[in-house]
Structures are given as structure tokens and as C-alpha cells.
Image: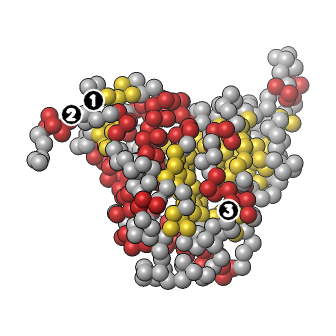
């Protein structure tokens, strides 16, 4: 039982590969480039909720894998996704983060596209007749877009399996909420974090940092026996929880949250807590009365844009919405008692790995998929290696 010298500190753990992760996966530019191509270029990614595009012509811009895209609802009610770049010389077509456009006219030379991405107008198009090109060949690049009960996902890979196959039931715990009635996004925030995208995602996969949050020590840790907490892992790197319980009444300022202060989301109860982790970088969480969806957009090995949405019941009375906003912000708002602490933790680990003060992390808790098991993290990193080809062992460290 002693502190370690340099050799002892730097030595890779003499543990099975699943139990640890080398720090290089958070810091190396070549690994980041692999992730962008092999993970973000090929897997389904949550883009937005359908309530963000309620009317025909509504659009929303998103950034994914370093690409500018937009989703747009057509007059037929379907939401489609396209590269946000003109077929002519590549100018950005839509510059506002969201809006409404029945057709899209590029500001540069006024080429025009419809909601299906078809090129429908080129000024003096006859000038291209000698080149033999015309509108029919000059549509936008469409990106696959599929919905799971109102959650819109996109995939850059035209050959990827359908969304439902990819999810492998990982969102099933939320289906009763998502099916029960229309929801809408009432909170959206965008935060730039000085950390690798996985460091943020780990805050959602690691349940036992609940000891860090004072609010969770008082509302969650003892709300149900550890052995009764069920965790789950799914194919394709997803994970999640069974139906967990929280106890709000003992926490100052939370009285009423666990009773009938505001109706819980349909299909859940005021004290129920559950989460789903989607590979690669999204998480869906609910706390009885409110639901949150996180999505990461990695900018570089040490920079991540985090989008966070809060959802409530569409069309509910204003007094209900105010209470629901309070419930969201108590945990998840910018001054909440949960999310800002997670951001501190993610950036703290990132700092240690970027300066190589730390060189690996441990994910070795085994509790038979209950309590505070690290199984969700292990499942994530197995899938991560399957995509990137990056592996490690106690002799060689990380290699691809
Ligand atoms: S770049 Fe769009 S019309 Fe020329
Ligand atoms: Fe947390």
C-alpha cells in the first residue's frame, strides 16, 4: 500500500483489456480522425426532435462529423436531411440556425432547390447545354434521416442498417413516454467543452459518480437498494437502465417534485428515473416530469460541442410548463445541481490526459449489471474498438 514511482504510474494495468482505457484515445489527432470517419461517418446520430420542425418548410441546421447539414420538413410532412452546400460552387445554402423555407435559393448565383433537394432553378440554364449538364443532375446531397417515435436520427452512410436495427431496443424504456402523446422541446442549450467527446459521454455512462453530486447523494443513492437497480447493455454499443427510483422530498427546495406538483410525463411516474445511452454520443434521460437528450459534436480531440434539450408535454398549461422548466433546471440547467458538476469532471479528466499527467482510466467495476457496474462503459469501448480498429493491451498500450 504505497504511492507509485514513475515506472509504476506509467505501467499499463495488468488487467484484461476491457477493464481500462488508455489516455491516448482522448488526445491523439490520428485517433480522432479515425473516429470521425469510422464512427461518426457510419453510425446513426440523434439530430433533433420533430417538434423543432412543426410546419412544412421548417428547417434546422446541424453539424455532424465536421459537415454542415440541415433537416427540413417538406409539404408531404416528411423530414429530410441534406448537406448545407450548393451544387454549384459549394456556398452555404442556409445560414440561420433554424427557420422556414419553402424553397432554397443560394445567395451566390441564385440556384434554387425544393424540399426534396431537387435543383429547380438555374438562371440562364442554357449556358450549360454545351457542357451537357442540367438541373436533373444537380440535386443536393441527401443524408439518410429516420425517426424513432419523434426522435430524428441521421446517418452519413448510405449502406448502414435501418435505424431500428441499429438501436437494438436501447430506447425501449422510453417508448411508453414517446408513444403516449406529443412532446416538445422547451429547453435547448449549446455548450463548448474543453474535453474529448467521450469524456462527456462517460458522465452519462458512469452511474456511480452520483457520489460527486450532493443532490444525487441526497435524492438517488439511497432511494432504492443497489442490488435492485438494473442496468442494461445492447448490441452496437448502447446501454441504459431499468426503471430506477429517486426520492425528492428530503432535498431542500425539491418538496412537491415527487408528488403531484405537475403531471409526470405520460408512461412514467414522478419519482422514476431512467436513461438510455446511444452509441456513439447521445443520451436520453428522464426524471419523471422532464426528459433530456444530449448530443455531442466533436470538434477536435480536446473540444466538444454539447447540445442539450429538455422536453415536456406539447400544449400543456403555462403553469405546468413553468414547473417543468424548474424541474429541468434544478438538475440540468446551466446553474443546476447536476450538469455543471459533470462538465467540471469531464474537463478535469481531459486536462490530466492532455498533459499526460494521467495515462489511463479504469472501468473495472463488476456488479452483475446492477448498482454501479461499469458494464455500460465496457460495452461502449468494445464497440468503439470494433469501429476504429484501435486496441490496447498491458504490453503495448494503444495501437491501431
Ligand atoms: S454557389 Fe450557389 S448558386 Fe453559385
Ligand atoms: Fe453526473
Q: What residue does disc 1 label? A: 394
Mark 3–mark 2 Cα distance, whole angstroms, equals 47 Å
- Residue 11 is labelled as 2
Dot 1 lies on which element? loop
Q: Residue at x 82, y 17 (%)?
A: 131
Mark 1–mark 3 Cα distance, whole angstroms, equals 44 Å
The percent coordinates of residue 160 (x first, y second) are 66, 31
Q: Residue at x 54, y 83 (%)?
A: 256
Q: What residue does disc 3 label? A: 177
Crowdedness of circle 3 by 10 Å Cα count: few (<14), some, many (20+)? Answer: many
Is mark 2 in CB contact (under 8 Å) with mark 1? yes
**Foreground residue among 246 and 355:** 246
Mark 2–mark 1 Cα distance, whole angstroms, equals 8 Å
Reading the chain from its start, which is encountered first: label 3 or label 2? 2
Mark 1, ligand 2, within 8 Å: the answer is no
Crowdedness of circle 1 by 10 Å Cα count: few (<14), some, many (20+)? Answer: some
The percent coordinates of residue 271 (x first, y second) are 54, 72
Amino acid at each position: 500500500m504505497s504511492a507509485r514511482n514513475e515506472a509504476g504510474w506509467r505501467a499499463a494495468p495488468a488487467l484484461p483489456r476491457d477493464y481500462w482505457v488508455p489516455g491516448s484515445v482522448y488526445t491523439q489527432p490520428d485517433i480522432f480522425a479515425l473516429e470521425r470517419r469510422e464512427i461518426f461517418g457510419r453510425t446513426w446520430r440523434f439530430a433533433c426532435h420533430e417538434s423543432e420542425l412543426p410546419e412544412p418548410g421548417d428547417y434546422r441546421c446541424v453539424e455532424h462529423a465536421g459537415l454542415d447539414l440541415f433537416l427540413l420538413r417538406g409539404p408531404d410532412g416528411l423530414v429530410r436531411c441534406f448537406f448545407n452546400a450548393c451544387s454549384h460552387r459549394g456556398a452555404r445554402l442556409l445560414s440561420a440556425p433554424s427557420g422556414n423555407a419553402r424553397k432554397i435559393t443560394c445567395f451566390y448565383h441564385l440556384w434554387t432547390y425544393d424540399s426534396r433537394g431537387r435543383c429547380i432553378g438555374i438562371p440562364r440554364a442554357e449556358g450549360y447545354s454545351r457542357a451537357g449538364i442540367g438541373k436533373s443532375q444537380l440535386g443536393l446531397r441527401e443524408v439518410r434521416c429516420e425517426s424513432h417515435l419523434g426522435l430524428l436520427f441521421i446517418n452519413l452512410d448510405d449502406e448502414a442498417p435501418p435505424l431500428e436495427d441499429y438501436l437494438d431496443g436501447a430506447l425501449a424504456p422510453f417508448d411508453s413516454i414517446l408513444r403516449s402523446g406529443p412532446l416538445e422541446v422547451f429547453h435547448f442549450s449549446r455548450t463548448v467543452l474543453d474535453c474529448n467527446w467521450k469524456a462527456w459521454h462517460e458522465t452519462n455512462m458512469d452511474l456511480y459518480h452520483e457520489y460527486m453530486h450532493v443532490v444525487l447523494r441526497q435524492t438517488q443513492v439511497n432511494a432504492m437498494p443497489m442490488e435492485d437497480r438494473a442496468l442494461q447493455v445492447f448490441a452496437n454499443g448502447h446501454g441504459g437502465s431499468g426503471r430506477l427510483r429517486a426520492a425528492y422530498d428530503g432535498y431542500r427546495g425539491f418538496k412537491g417534485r415527487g408528488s403531484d406538483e405537475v403531471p409526470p410525463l405520460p408512461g412514467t411516474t414522478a419519482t422514476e428515473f431512467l436513461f438510455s445511452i446511444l452509441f456513439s454520443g447521445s443520451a436520453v434521460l428522464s426524471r419523471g416530469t422532464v426528459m433530456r437528450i444530449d448530443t455531442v459534436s466533436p470538434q477536435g480531440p480536446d473540444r466538444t460541442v454539447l447540445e442539450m434539450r429538455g422536453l415536456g408535454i406539447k400544449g400543456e398549461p403555462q403553469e405546468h410548463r413553468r414547473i417543468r422548466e424548474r424541474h429541468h433546471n434544478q438538475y440540468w440547467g446551466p446553474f443546476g445541481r447536476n450538469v455543471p458538476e459533470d462538465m467540471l469532471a469531464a474537463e478535469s479528466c481531459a486536462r490530466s490526459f492532455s498533459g499526460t499527467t494521467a495515462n489511463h482510466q479504469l472501468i473495472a467495476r463488476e456488479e452483475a449489471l446492477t448498482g454501479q457496474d461499469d458494464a455500460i462503459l465496457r460495452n461502449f469501448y468494445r464497440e468503439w474498438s470494433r469501429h476504429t480498429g484501435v486496441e490496447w493491451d498491458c504490453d503495448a498500450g494503444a495501437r491501431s
